[in-house]
Amino acid sequence: MSIRVMLVDDQVLLRTGFRMVLAAQPDMEVVAEAGDGVEALEVLRSTAVDVVLMDVRMPKLDGVETTRRICSQPDAPKVLILTTFDLDEYAFSGLKAGASGFMLKDVPPGELLAAIRSVHSGDAVVAPSTTRRLLDRFSPMLPSTGSETRAADSAIQRLTDREREVMMLVAQGLSNGEIAARLVLSEATVKTHVGRILTKLGLRDRVQVVVLAYESGLVRAGGGAA
């Protein structure tokens, strides 16, 4: 079954380019397009989509708010943020809004296709270390509210000591293999712990684990443990 992709960008030529690349793939299909967030939300009411490629700077409703509204819905499609500049503050906001990752608009076609497939399979497409750099840079400028911090703290209390330890290492940018070496565990065991963390906290992927770890104070800006 093909991955159903929606393109959301106010630049028609850019959408055309992405559509041509995706159309050449046997496992992908562009099922919808929109030029702004308002149009995207309207189209999604009547169109089944698996992955949304989302621009951030658009008229009427920007990509961050559009992402937040999409991801708040049950059985929402995965959102992949497209940004013009590396470490754009919009990318950080998009991750907090529920996006499964971000990529630069000038990404090579092969990397874009791999990212779409990864997001569709449930993985994040931002390396944890890259996500950490985003958070280190922008979290001091975009503080969570007190209620968000209390909710994050409450959620983390549901974890076992080992799960909390694994979560902290995920948030510091370590891969499953690196966490396994650090804790003297098998990589399969670490993967199981990560899966349980996602389930207990109601998170979609590792990106959201990192965001929650920062909101709760489990990890501080700079990547260190609190």
Image (cartoon, grey):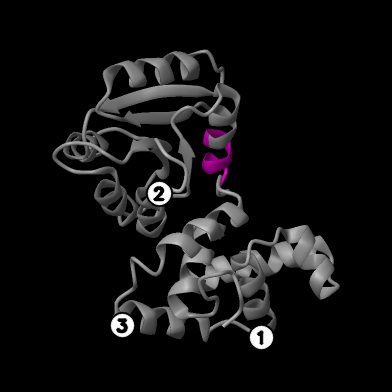
Q: Which numbered disc covers residue 152?
A: none
What residue appears at the point 60 percent right and 56 percent down from the top-left corner? 128
Of the image marks 2 and 3, the number of the one nearer the N terminus: 2
Identified by mark 3, the residue type is Gly
Q: At numbered mark 3, what does the secondary structure look like: helix, strand or loop? A: helix
186 over 147 or under it: above or below? above
Query: Disc 1, disc 2: CB below 8 Å?
Result: no
Position of 133 compared to 38: left or right?
right
Q: Quadrant of residue 129?
A: bottom right
Q: Is 81 placed above or below 92 here?
A: above
Decide if residue 203 is in sight here.
no
**Residue denoted by label 1:** 161
Q: Residue at x 45, y 84 (%)?
A: 153
Task: In this rendered view, identify the residue nearer to me: 175 or 199.
Answer: 175
Residue 213: give x, y in percent of width and height.
51, 73
The residue under label 2 is: 91
| Disc 1 element | helix
Residue bearing the label numbered 3: 146
Residue 201, how many percent across, how many down? 49, 72
